[in-house]
Image (cartoon, helix red, strand yellow):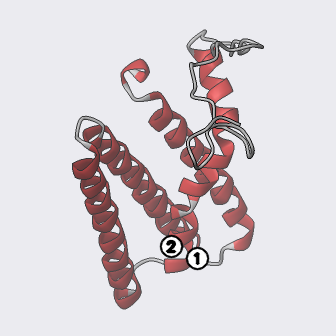
Amino acid sequence: MLRKVNRTLLEMWTGMALFGTVCQLAGLFLAGDQARYAKSLWFGILLAAVNAFHMYRTLDRALGLDERTASKAIFKGYMFRYVFLVALFAVIMVTNCLNPLIVFLAYMSLKVTALMQPITHKFYNKVFHETDPVPMPLEENPPQEERTKIPREGEGPSQDGLQK
């Protein structure tokens, strides 16, 4: 089942779960209201996971479009996520049902997973018994294309049409 999920998305979700676990353990010692802290934390992690999936879907759909349409589709996806996030945080702050700072901390797991990606990538390479392709060196003397020679000053035809 894990092989069917996009590999980058799987690595991001794993990083988010790991980040959430570390934050949950830290919250055991630092948080006053454990239940509210845990609800806020895992809601933010879930929000980040859904956001990552929406980014993946938006980019995946845009790849099949021409450049102009793809740019518009990506921008629409970005604006949807941004407006949704602002509205959701407004509701959280007005209702005071969750701690908005903890939700934001958990939402930032999107950024943390980007930094953790080399670690999660190596982990899943071991899980799936895969290796990354080895980059091949470029040729030392790549074939030169036929170029028109640009004359330097003093070379080429003069203004009166005679060769110098």
Could you classify mark 1 by the number of other residues whose Cα lies within 10 Å: few (under 14), some (14-19), or many (20 or more)?
few
Residue beneath the point at 30% across and 47% down: 58
Where disc 2 sits, the SS reads helix
Q: Position of residue 89 (x, y in %)?
A: 39, 79
| Position of 26 relative to 122 (above/below) | below
Q: Position of residue 59 (x, y in %)?
A: 34, 44
Please, which residue is most extreme toward the bottom here?
Answer: 94
| Position of 138 relative to 20 (above/below) | above
Where disc 1 sits, the SS reads loop
Which image quadrant for residue 135? top right
Marks 2 and 1 in Cβ contact (< 8 Å): yes
Depth check: give the residue in front, 112 or 91: 112
From the image, tell me which residue sits under label 1: 33
Residue beneath the point at 48% across and 69% down: 40
Q: Is residue 5 left or right of residue 100?
A: left
Q: Position of residue 99 (x, y in %)?
A: 50, 78
| Position of 144 relative to 65 (above/below) | above
Depth check: give the residue in front, 147 or 97: 147
Amino acid residing under circle 1 = Asp
Which image quadrant for residue 72? bottom left
From the image, tell me which residue sits under label 2: 36
Depth check: give the residue in front, 31 or 2: 2
Residue beneath the point at 25% across and 40% down: 61
Q: Quadrant of the C terminus?
A: top right
Amino acid residing under circle 2 = Arg
Q: CA distance from mark 2 to mark 1?
A: 6 Å
